[in-house]
Amino acid sequence: MRELNLDRLRTLVTIADLRSFAEAARVLHLAAPTVSLHVADLEAHIGAPLLVRKRGEVSASGAGEVLIERARRLLADADETLEVVQRQVQGLAGRVRLGASTGAIAHLLPQALEQLGQHHPGIDVQVAVLTTQETMARLANGALDIGLVALPPPAHSAQHARVQGVKVLPWRRDPVMAFVPSRWKAPARATPHWLASQPLILNDDGTSLSRLTSEWFARAGEHPKARIQLNYNDAIKSLVAAGYGATLLPQEASADAPRDPRIRMLPLRPALWRPLGIAHRTGPVERATQHVLDVLWQQKQA
């Protein structure tokens, strides 16, 4: 069965509203034979008369009234759908899917999202808590629009990203610090040897931060075993505050952010940095996605 044509339905509704084929042709900027053809095509499709001509006026038949009522809804839905899509194309509204780690979401995204909301309140950013590897995979298969990823990404993910056309650019780097209970007797700077002798709370194996810190220990010949492994930085800090152990985390919060007095932050010796990049698919970028990228780039650090 052929589908109903929206242009023909619009013609039918306009004739019913104006009660005239000629007026409908004028309003719709169509030739009179075209208007008649639209109605004839609908009547053939339905299998019944839709309009009744009587004494110079046009009225709807019983079947016509039912179709016209439904046609109004269809046309309204179509117009609304087109408006929504146009707003997305124009960057006035839209949905942007973003993947990032818990730390980046908690400490780096809020300011960017606040700025986005001030200038582009119609853009909805949907955030997923993901590892770098998960983020790269979802970008590659089109399930994400933007990713905040550790640099460099895992080798196999980066290769897959190149095949799928994912672009990764350096964004910012944050110093990795030792977070220790304030009551501990600690040096001014934390070394791999000193930290390896302490009870440790570290990120899960397989995360970029775990790989980064493991390499930092290994360069000093240390291979400590964590007392517990988590992938939720706020939970890790809570355990540090309780005196359960020390950890290594990026200093993502601003310098003037309130800190827990039960936790002391120590710089590392040698220093360690956690670099982050912004990843997105190559090719044309929707305006809503570009607006999110713009506010993220404003959070860039040297």
Image: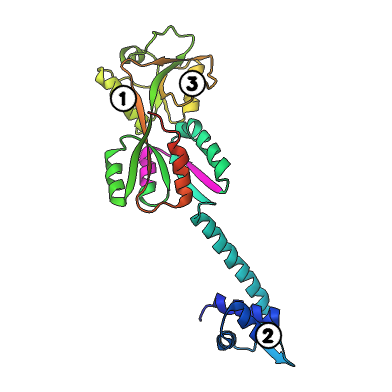
Q: Which residue is mark 3?
A: 255
Q: Is residue 31 magenta?
A: no
Up the image or down, 182 lies above or below 287; here it is: above
User: What's the residue type where badge 2 is placed?
Assistant: Ser
- Name the front one of labels 1 and 3: 3
- Give left or right: position of 97 versus 4: left
For the residue pair 212 and 171, the one nearer the viewer reads as 171
- Name the front one of labels 2 and 1: 2
Q: Which residue is mark 1?
A: 214
Task: Tell me if label 1 and label 3 are in contact, CB under 8 Å.
Answer: no
Q: Which residues are magenta?
A: 123-138
On the image, the x and y values in percent for residue 270 come to 30, 16
Q: Which residue is mark 2?
A: 20
Task: Tell me if label 2 and label 1 are in contact, CB under 8 Å.
Answer: no
User: What's the residue type where badge 1 is placed?
Assistant: Ser
Up the image or down, 225 lies above or below 15; here it is: above
Q: Secondary structure at mark 3?
A: loop
Task: Tell me if label 3 and label 2 are in contact, CB under 8 Å.
Answer: no
On the image, the x and y values in percent for residue 117 come to 56, 42
On the image, the x and y values in percent for residue 125 come to 51, 45
Q: Is residue 133 magenta?
A: yes
Badge number at residue 127: none
How far, Cα to Cα, is label 2 from label 1? Answer: 80 Å
For the residue pair 302 and 225, the one nearer the viewer reads as 302
Q: Secondary structure at mark 2?
A: loop
Report the residue at 34% width, 39% height from top: 169
Q: Quadrant of residue 177?
A: top left
Q: Is residue 205 visible?
A: no
Quadrant the C terminus occupies: top left
Chain-order first, disc 2 or disc 1: 2
